[in-house]
Every structure is written in structure tokens, then in C-alpha cells.
Image (cartoon, rainbow, N blue to C red):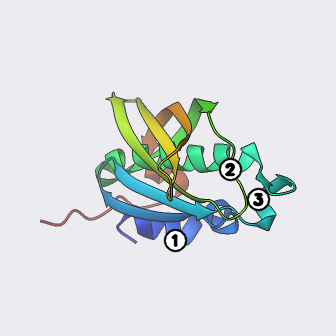
Amino acid sequence: MDTVKGLYDKFNNVDKGLDFELTVHGPGDIEYRTTIAEKHLSSPGVGHGAITAAMMDAVLGTTALTAVYDDGNLVSTVEFKVNYFKPTFLGDKLIGKGEIEFQGKSLICTSAKIFKEETGELVSKALGTFNIYPMEKRGLKKPVKTI
């Protein structure tokens, strides 16, 4: 489990329950995907904003996590602000991508966007701040670095 994806697969039950799929390309470079399903709806055919917010928190946080994980750290959400630009509908395929905006010793800020995969329409945009802390606080061992 010496990877962010390994950690995700072992512990992240919320994202699994919401059908979020994570791909990690490298530090600060991830993608989340989901398809709006019946269980994501708030009214007939319309995706609930909480699903977009949950996906956004995942995109922002995992982007931050990939930047600090190899140093033996985890992150926790301090705050995030989300703008909703377009509604989502049953069957929409969403893709979320993040970027590192700032990284200090104890805080990291990321930004992210979620798009409709088929049309490229921007669904939402967000900015988040995360606390950086050692993974030993959660009983995990620092990952082994490989060449």
C-alpha cells in the first residue's frame, strides 16, 4: 500500500459508495470520474449538488494528498469553496481535475474543476485548503521511497 491509490482503495469507503473512480498520474496530477446515477438524483433526472460537492472535495483533497504522500504525510480538509455553473443530469459522465496552488509546511491549497466529459462543459470550480500532518497520527507507516 505504498501508493496514494493503495491508500484510497483500502480506506476510502465514501468515494466507493458514491461510485467515484480515482486515477493517479503523479504528484498533483489526478483525475476523478463518475456517472450520475439514480442514487445521485435530488429531483427527477437532476443530480444533487451534494454529489458535485463531494466529488470536488475528493478532487481537491486527493490532489493535495499526492503532493505530500511521499514525504509521509496525509491531509485533512480545512475549508473549500465551490461554484456551481451547470446542473448535472442522469447519465452525465463527469471528470474532475485539480492543481496545486500553494504548498507550505502545514497547509496546502488546491484548485479543481469538474467537467461534463461528453461536452466539455464546466460544471463547477473550487478552491480548497488542507492541513498537512504526519501519517503516523493515523497509525500508518511512512511509505518506502523507490528510485
Closer to the observer: label 1 or label 2? Answer: 2
Mark before the other along the chain sequence, 1 or 2: 1
Residue at the limit of the structure toward the left, as seen here? 147
Image side of residue 30 versus residue 53, left or right: left
Rendered view: 97 above or below 93: above
Q: What residue sits right under mark 2 in the picture?
A: 88
Q: What residue sits right under mark 1 in the picture?
A: 9
Q: Nearer the viewer, residue 41 or 13?
A: 41
Q: Are marks 1 and 3 in contact (CB under 8 Å)?
A: no
Q: Nearer the viewer, residue 129 or 32?
A: 32
Rendered view: 127 above or below 68: above
Which amino acid, by three-letter code, is at mark 2? Thr
- Neighbour class for label 3 at 10 Å: few (<14), some, many (≥20)? many
Residue 136 coordinates in the image, percent (x, y) = 46, 52
Q: What residue sits right under mark 3 in the picture?
A: 40
> The C terminus appears in which quarter of the rendering?
bottom left
Residue 23 coordinates in the image, percent (x, y) = 41, 64
Q: Nearer the viewer, residue 34 or 43?
A: 43
Which amino acid, by three-letter code, is at mark 1? Asp
Provide the secondary structure element on which disc 3 rests. Answer: helix
Residue at 73% across / 66% down in the picture?
37
- Count up the numbered dots: 3
Which amino acid, by three-letter code, is at mark 3? His
